[in-house]
Amino acid sequence: MRGARRLRLRFDERRGVLKLTCPMRTSRRAALAWAAEQREWVDTQLADMLPAEPFAAGNRIPIEGRETWLVWAQGEPRLPRRDGEQLRCGGPQSGFPRRVEAFLKRLALETLSSETAGAAAAAGVSPRSVTVGDANTRWGSCSSERRIRYSWRLILAPPAARRYVVAHEVAHLVHLDHGPGFKALEEKLFDGDVASARALLRRVGPRLKRIGRGH
């Protein structure tokens, strides 16, 4: 594009298309390669287009990839519990969304901490800490201080997608880059088809980022 000084992606919400602009001398291959690296940003824009899926009784959400009915039942304990294809919870109905979210965050931390410990042991390393949050664009991160942080929404994803992120972040405990050594360790820790798991997470990710919104 004439006058463009740097590569830029813009999402046209009205038309539902991505627009890539770049300086005139930028090669098509380089521009597309750069755009491919912005996938997490693109996923966030797509998620913003989807309708919110609040934690409301009668709605369905995926838990570990399995569609689960949210059920509020007067007289049942306040602490949510899984019962087959249902997540059941009592207590005041006004606090139902908050209790469901708290339950999912606890489950996410327990599951991801356990899986991280297993992968770290296989890699011969140990993280300083494992926490969960709700970052808009990242499923996981690993700092140079060996602190791993995940999106709690990974507990909504199919297990293969979640375990891929665990393998990815644990591999970063050994390699801070994405070079051949990192990729080899990531594949070893995941023990499966990394590309397929990554594609699965990209496919379901936009919806997962909208679950629990709107309440």
Image (tube, rainbow, N blue to C red):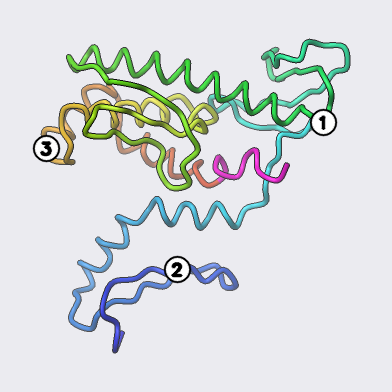
Point 42% across, 72% down: residue = 19
Residue at which label 3 appears: 180
Above or below — where is 198 with respect to 26? above
- Residue 33 rendering spot, x and y as whole percentages: 25, 61
First in sequence, mark 2 or 1: give its number.
2
Q: Who's the residue at 26% across and 80% down the image?
A: 5
Disc 3, disc 2: CB below 8 Å? no
Residues at circles 2 and 1 in contact by the CB criterion of under 8 Å? no
For residue 21, which quarter of the picture? Answer: bottom left
- Residue 20 lies, in percent from the top left, at 36, 72
Residue 18: mark in rendering: 2
Q: Classify mark 1: helix, strand or loop.
A: helix
Q: Nearer the viewer, mark 2 or mark 1?
A: 1
In the image, is residue 118 part of the stretch drawn in magenta? no
Quarter of image, res 26: bottom left
From the viewer's side, name the closer residue of 117 and 91.
Answer: 91
Callout 2 crowding tier (Cα within 10 Å): few <14, some 14–19, many ≥20: some
Q: In the image, which residues are magenta? A: 207-215
